[in-house]
Amino acid sequence: MKKDKQKVLDEVWDESRIESFLELQPADACDADFYRLQKAYQGMRADDFAVFLGLFAKGNHNINATDLNGRSLLSYVKEHKSAGDYAAALQQHGAC
């Protein structure tokens, strides 16, 4: 990190910022819903991710969308030891 950059911890995310992830579009042929889920997972804390998933579900998005390799986000999340809260949130919204 550059010396002129200050590390931000525990940044508060409001609902409009969380909702903005629903508008993300992939630059390649990746499924848009998978891309949105992946970016939200990578960029949000577990609590914010759970809020995002509620909005995602309301918008009739596909929680089981897959990447170009045919894998769902849940399959990746399950490989991460410290991602239990994320996996639980995905499963609560129907991910399998």
Image (cartoon, rainbow, N blue to C red):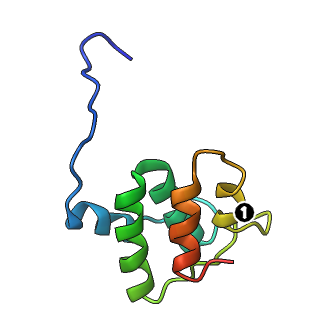
Instruction: Please tell me which residue lies in front, 11 or 87.
Output: 87
Residue 26 visible at all: no
Name the quadrant of the C terminus.
bottom right
Q: Name the quadrant containing residue 87.
A: bottom right
Q: In the rendered view, does 84 fall on the left or right side of 71?
A: left
Q: Nearer the viewer, residue 11 or 16?
A: 11
- Secondary element at tag 1: helix
**Residue that appears at 58% across and 83% down:** 94
Q: Residue furthest right?
A: 69
In the displayed structure, would residue 65 be above or below residue 5?
below
The quadrant in which the N terminus is found is top left
In-front residue for pair 4/96: 96
Residue 50 in which image quadrant: bottom left
Q: Nearer the viewer, residue 40 or 67?
A: 40
Q: Position of residue 9 (x, y in %)?
A: 28, 34
**In this picture, residue 71 sits left or right of residue 7:** right
> Taking 53 as reference, is 61 above or below it?
below
5 relative to 24, above or below: above
- Residue 90 x/y as whole percent: 55, 71
Q: Looking at the image, which residue is at 75% across and 66% down?
A: 71
Q: Which residue is mark 1?
A: 75
Residue 64 percent location from the top left of the image? 64, 78
Q: Residue at x 24, y 43 (%)?
A: 11
Q: Residue at x 42, y 78 (%)?
A: 56
Residue 75 can be seen in this image = yes
90 lies left or right of 48: right
Q: Is residue 92 above or below residue 38?
A: below
Amino acid type at image mark 1 = Ser
